[in-house]
Amino acid sequence: MKTTLAVLSLTALLAPVLGQAADAPITAQQYQSVLAGSWRDPANSARDGYRHPQQTLAFFGLGARQTVIEITPGGGWYSEVLAPLLKDHGQYVAAVQAASSSDYARASEANLKKKFAADPARYGKASVVEFDPKAPVFGKPASADAVLTFRNVHNWVEAGTAPATFSAFYSVLKPGGVLGVEDHRAKDGADLQAIKDSGYLTTAQVVKLASDAGFKLAGQSEVNANPKDTKDYPAGVWTLPPTLKLGEQDKAKYVAIGESDRMTLRFIKPTR
């Protein structure tokens, strides 16, 4: 009996330590090594000063052993960072729209798959899943540790699919899992139509979408804030870099402003 008690006591003492090791956050050195990686597109690396990937992902609390789903990653700006960070012990999943009617989305998916196939050393473990935006499913229930989305929520609001999308996030996440959201931030009180026209969202609207799905707001960061962004441009947020929709018209002015002012929010799926 004494031996059994001793073993149980030792296990109890070690359990928190083992748990911490399993969920240990990605280190600053790991981030810096990946961000300096030669595989990254130079045009993507040039945007680090606007997008602050290390600080953003650290705020979300990612661990190297986690299963992380990125929703509609486009051409793979964050894929170039996340997939290599997770390749040894975790799992990176890119969720893309099935049978998209958008030429941009189809081209982005093709380029993403090409990127993965061309560099198995970095992306060999990465996977791509397709989802129906009208009835989204991102994986088996309670199978992911984190779901991340960058500058996409405004598209779902415009399409009327945001509530279903956030509900699907809740379903695929494990209890205690993280939903990380970054998006263009509107001025407080902006009305819905103005948001649809501009590409900006209020923080309150995103928090409500997540809360209605069952999430709890766990933190807000100003790491992607841009006080130069006046949010009142002829072509909405797409007036600014990297889109620069107006072309050469006032280009220097918009380049000097930089990318949009963005909210960065961390939500948690409650454990009960």
Image: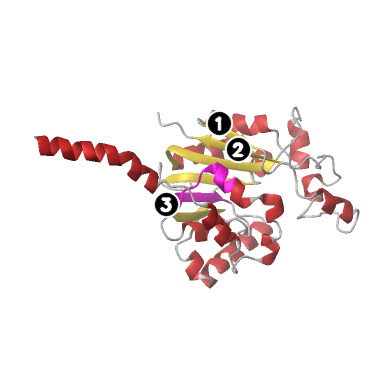
* Alpha carbon separation for disc pair 2 and 1: 8 Å
Residue 65 bears which disc, if any?
A: 3
Q: Which residues are magenta?
A: 56-71
For the C terminus, give its image quadrant. top left
Q: Percent position (x, y) of residue 62?
A: 50, 47
- In the image, residue 250 sits, relative to residue 208, either above or below, namely below
Circle 3 SS class: loop
Count of all numbered marks drawn on residues in the image: 3
Q: Of the residues shown, which amino acid type is indicated by label 1?
A: Leu
Q: Nearer the viewer, residue 209 or 230?
A: 230
How busy is the neighbourhood of tag 1: few (under 14 within 10 Å), some, or many (20 plus)? some
- For marks 1 and 3, give the CA distance: 23 Å
Q: Earlier in the sequence, mark 1 or mark 3?
A: 3
User: Residue at image x 50%, y 30%?
Assistant: 214
Residue 78 location in percent, x, y? 59, 55
Q: Quadrant of residue 262?
A: top right
Q: Is residue 42 magenta?
A: no
The percent coordinates of residue 234 (x first, y second) are 86, 45
The local crowd at label 2, few if under 14, some if 14 to 19, many if 20 or more residues have their Cα within 10 Å, is many
Residue 63 located within the stretch drawn in magenta: yes
Residue 200 visible in the picture: yes
Residue at image location 67% in from the left, 50% down from the top: 51
Q: Is residue 271 left or right of residue 154?
A: left
From the viewer's perspective, tell me whether residue 62 is left or right of residue 89.
Answer: right
- Residue 265's disc is 2
Residue placed under numbered mark 1 in the picture? 217
Judge by depth and name the residue closer to the eye, 215 or 8: 8
Q: Quadrant of the N terminus?
A: top left
